[in-house]
Image (cartoon, grey):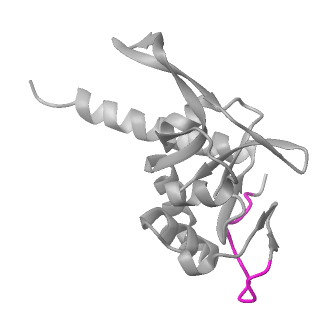
Amino acid sequence: TEPTEPCRVSSSGHHTRCGEHMVDSGADSFPQNELEELLMEAARNPARRDAFRRAVVAARLFVLGTADKQASAEREGQARAKVELYGILVEGRRVVPAFTSEARIEEFVKSPQPYLGLAGSDLLDLLEPDVGLALNPSSAYGKEFLPEEVRVLRDLVAAVRESKEGREGSRPV
């Protein structure tokens, strides 16, 4: 599957179809952080898309959802909360909206909603195999990751984790 590309709004400030999703006006408030800078660069320059993908995996993303305060599972001796993510339908596809900042999530919702901040790699671990990820939906710059692209991001996470484990395991005693 050919990945969809990050998008930007036209200079007229109107809705623009870009790749597989819609983007909206509000370009004046971009960028607010390094991830948004990379998103904008990736929209203009395909050579920056790998750096953007790596940044998504490493970034703190904000998602609509809740976390159960009670520990529901244990992993590596640490309590882990049960997380429920809220999804949306985009042209019949299930996606989880994620945002590059709290300001972006506030632009998206029309009334107060619960949300969480998660590492991109942790968010990817929570997504079901047939669910995509919509980064900054309805913002001036956004990106929809189709389920196939989410798998690519998961592979990137796995490679980073293996690399870290390999370096930690090869230290002299």
Q: Residue at x 90, y 51 (%)?
A: 91
Residue 101 seen in the current view: no
Q: Residue at x 78, y 43 (%)?
A: 88
Q: Quadrant of residue 171?
A: top left
Classified by dominant secondary structure, the portion drawn in magenta counts as loop
Residue 109 at what x, y percent from top left? 67, 52
Residue 123 at what x, y percent from top left? 55, 37
Magenta stretch in the rendered image: 3-14
| Vertical order, 131 against 47 (above or below) | above
Q: Residue at x 50, y 54 (%)?
A: 102
Which quadrant of the rendered structure holds the C terminus? top left
Judge by depth and name the residue closer to the eye, 50 or 96. 96
Q: Quadrant of residue 153?
A: top right
Q: Is residue 165 left or right of residue 129?
A: left
Q: Is residue 16 left or right of residue 6?
A: right
Asked whether residue 139 is drawn in magenta, I would say no
Judge by depth and name the residue closer to the eye, 54 or 118. 118
Q: Check the image and name the residue furthest to the right.
A: 92
Judge by depth and name the residue closer to the eye, 109 or 57. 109
Residue 63 at what x, y percent from top left? 58, 43
| Vertical order, 91 against 155 (above or below) | below
